[in-house]
Every structure is written in C-alpha cells, then in structure tokens.
Image: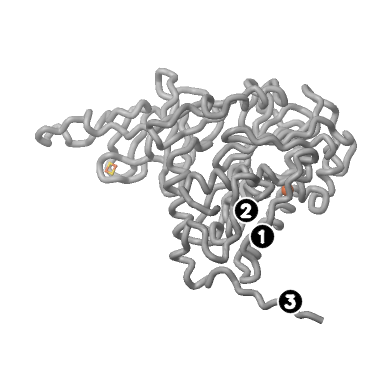
C-alpha cells in the first residue's frame, strides 16, 4: 500500500512575523471567481504584520458601528467606541447635532471620557480642560495668563459620523463616501424584514471573548453550509431550502424567506410584523446584522479584532419601544446560550487548525443554485480583504 507523501508544511511558523502578503511557492491561488479559488492562506489569520496592515488598510478608513441612535437621543448623551487603538467619542450636542471626535484631550493627551453617559460638557479628568459637546474648547484653567493662547486652536479633532437604519457609524477617513451611498439597497432590505426599524431602541449588549482571528468569525457567519451539522436548533427554526446568500458590493444578505416551524427547538413564537425565517446581513468590514422571526427585533454582532488571534464580539439588541417581552427574551437567550456558543466553538477550533502545520488552504464549496450549501459569500469577503491589503494571491 502506498503511503501518503509527507507533508511539506507551507510556512515555518517561526518566520511568521515577516510573513508575506503575496502568493508564495507553496500557496494555491486565491482567484477572483469563488468556484476556481482556494481560501486565503492560513498566515492571513496568524501573522502580526498582516494584522497591523489590516488595521491601517481596513479599519481606519471604513465605516465602524459605534452604537445605536437611541443611546444618543437627548442633547448631552455620549458614547465611546474603540477602533483598534483609536478611541472615539460620539455626542449629541446642545443643538441636537450628532458629532464624533477622537476621544483625546488637546492639552496633553489624556482620554476624555469612557463608556457612555450624559453630560453638559466633556471635562478632561487630568487638568479639567472642558469642551463643548460640539467640540470647541470651552475652558482651560489659567490659559488666560498664557501669551497667544487661542482656544480655537484646541478644538477636538472631528471624525465622520452617520446614522444608518438607527445605527450610528463613524469613519476615521475624512474623505470616505457616506455609508448609505456605499451600500445601496441595504436599508431597503433591512426595512423589509424589520419595518419598525425606526421605533427600535437599544436594550442590551452581550459580550464574548473568542480565541480566533476576527476573520474566522466573519467567514463563519457568511455560510450556512455548517448549519445542518453544527446548528441543530437553527435548522429546525429556519426553512433551509429557502435560505439564500447574495453578495452585493460591500455587503451580503443571508435570508431565509420561510420559517420551518413556530414551535421549533430554538424558540417558540407567533408570527410578528413580517413572516420570514431569518434575515442576516454582513456589512464590510466587521459587522453582522440580524433579524429573527417573531416580535420585531434587530441586533448587530460586531467582530472586533483583539490582536491577531483574538476577537471581542459585541452583540447589541434593539427592540420596539425598548421593551424586552418574554418572547424576545427567548430569542435573545437562544442566540446567547445556544447559537453563539456553537459558533464560538467552531471558530476557536478553526483558529487552532489554521495554526497547524498540516493546513494552509482549502477550497470553497460553491453552488449558486443551492446557496444554503454554498460558500461564495465567504469568498466575497476574503476577496475584499485581499483587495484592501493590495495583495496578489493569484
Ligand atoms: S490632558 Fe486634559 S486637561 Fe490636561
Ligand atoms: Fe454558525
């Protein structure tokens, strides 16, 4: 009997800190067509340098979910969000305008605020310089005795902010086009599955720490090929024959038009505003948006890189009138206690596997006619990563 050839592992892990972006001799091609393509090489999920490049090339110039408009409903409300090592504060100023700034005092660089809250001014804890919620420096103790001190020179540094379907997004790139213009059609789709989107309020945040690269979690969201083997309750809730994954520009839709049963293993419900099985969207680069059947709800699950091998996930829940009914509690509990642990287990195992010397790349399973079994949306995402990094993997 022939023995299988011994594996020549593609990369000596000791050289990873200088791992190359472009195709290497042992790499199979990452192609523009999903059906022809191998997956991204494993080093993309392991290498510190590639991770640092991603922060610059992706996260510091794309729209980043920061919170929900209902958390900034009144003048004086503020919240913070960290994009990598860049802390941002979003405020509702006294004229009712939404504003966003780097969360840093213009005196000697202390962070201004943390978490979220309500205030008349942003006051730095270090030497008590204070700023209007519209960013102007309001008061700097003893600065009147400093020659040529001009308060106008020390306003907070603004960043772009936009509300999209009730969600607040910020962008560090001052020249970025609006999110609505970059994702045409997405708002209409969200409204189709959540017509009461304008009446939703933030009610809860669930937090998960996961031992995998952020892209493993996005890859996992983007296909339901794994749903039958790994999510027994989900495939009892959702009619998988009607599940369709469709990639469109900077987002993709993952929608099941029909519910399998309202008395299923995931949670029981009565048909709500809209009769559907499940609707999810991926929005580049790291946001997933979910609508479950039953009473109106929307949630976002944001995959936040925490070093190259870690991800912090925030899942924020928005429900009508801010009222978590018993049914919505069951929906949230299903996600938190069943689906998320299932996905986290899968993703942490994949991260360990990506680090194996016995693995570098696989093939995408692509079937346009049976998109519930197809991974073309994973390829769509990975192609965006490759493009953003300017890598040549063909
Ligand atoms: S660093 Fe903020 S007041 Fe000095
Ligand atoms: Fe899953």
Query: Closest to the observer: 304 or 31?
Result: 31
Instruction: Name which quarter of the figure residue 224 lies in.
Output: top right
Whether residue 159 is visible to the viewer of this picture, yes or no, is: yes
- Residue 100: x and y in percent read 41, 31
Position of 234 with respect to 188 (left or right) is: right
Q: Which mark is residue 350?
A: 1
Q: Earlier in the sequence, mark 2 or mark 1?
A: 2
Q: Name the secondary structure under disc 1.
A: helix
Q: Name the secondary structure under disc 2.
A: helix
User: Would you place residue 312 above or below residue 123 in this image?
Assistant: below
Packing grade of label 2 (10 A; few <14, some 14-19, many >=20) is many
Mark 3, ligand 2, within 8 Å: the answer is no
Query: Closest to the observer: 337 or 359?
Result: 359
Residue at the extreme left of the image, as rendered: 147
Packing grade of label 1 (10 A; few <14, some 14-19, many >=20) is some
Position of 267 with respect to 19 (left or right) is: right
User: Would you place residue 242 above or below residue 96 in this image?
Assistant: below
Position of 143 with respect to 291 (left or right) is: left
Q: Earlier in the sequence, mark 2 or mark 3?
A: 3
Q: Earlier in the sequence, mark 1 or mark 3?
A: 3
Q: Residue at x 47, y 43 (%)?
A: 59
Whether residue 71 is visible to the viewer of this picture, yes or no, is: no
User: Are dots 2 and 1 in contact, CB under 8 Å?
Assistant: yes
User: Are dots 1 and 3 in contact, CB under 8 Å?
Assistant: no
Q: Which residue is mark 3?
A: 4
Query: Closest to the observer: 241 or 333?
Result: 241
Q: Which mark is residue 216?
A: 2
């Amino acid at each position: 009997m022939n023995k299988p050839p011994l594996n020549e592992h593609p990369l000596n892990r000791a050289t990873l800190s200088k791992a190359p972006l472009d195709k290497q001799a042992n790499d199979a091609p990452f192609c523009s067509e999903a059906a022809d393509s191998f997956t991204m090489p494993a080093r993309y999920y392991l290498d510190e340098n590639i991770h640092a490049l991603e922060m610059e090339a992706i996260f510091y110039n794309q729209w980043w979910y920061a919170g929900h408009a209902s958390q900034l409903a009144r003048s004086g409300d503020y919240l913070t969000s960290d994009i990598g090592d860049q802390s941002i504060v979003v405020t509702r100023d006294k004229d009712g305008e939404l504003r966003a700034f780097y969360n840093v005092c213009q005196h000697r660089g202390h962070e201004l605020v943390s978490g979220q809250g309500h205030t008349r001014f942003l006051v730095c804890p270090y030497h008590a310089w204070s700023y209007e919620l519209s960013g102007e420096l309001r008061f700097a103790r003893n600065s009147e005795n400093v020659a040529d001190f001009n308060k106008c020179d020390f306003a907070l540094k603004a960043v772009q902010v936009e509300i999209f379907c009730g969600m607040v997004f910020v962008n560090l790139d001052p020249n970025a086009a609006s999110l609505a213009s970059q994702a045409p059609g997405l708002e209409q789709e969200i409204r189709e599955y959540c017509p009461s989107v304008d009446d939703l309020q933030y009610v809860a945040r669930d937090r998960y720490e996961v031992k995998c690269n952020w892209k493993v979690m996005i890859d996992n969201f983007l296909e339901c090929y794994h749903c039958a083997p790994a999510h027994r309750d989900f495939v009892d809730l959702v009619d998988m024959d009607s599940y369709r994954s469709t990639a469109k520009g900077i987002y993709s839709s993952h929608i099941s038009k029909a519910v399998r049963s309202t008395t299923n293993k995931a949670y029981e419900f009565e048909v709500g505003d809209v009769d559907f099985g499940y609707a999810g969207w991926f929005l580049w680069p790291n946001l997933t948006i979910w609508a479950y059947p039953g009473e109106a709800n929307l949630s976002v699950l944001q995959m936040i890189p925490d070093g190259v091998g870690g991800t912090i996930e925030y899942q924020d829940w928005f429900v009508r009138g801010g009222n978590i009914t018993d049914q919505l509690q069951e929906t949230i509990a299903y996600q938190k206690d069943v689906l998320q642990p299932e996905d986290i287990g899968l993703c942490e195992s994949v991260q360990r596997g990506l680090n194996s010397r016995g693995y570098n790349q696989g093939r995408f399973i692509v079937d346009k006619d049976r998109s519930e079994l197809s991974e073309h949306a994973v390829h769509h995402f990975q192609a965006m990563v490759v493009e953003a990094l300017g890598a040549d993997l063909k």
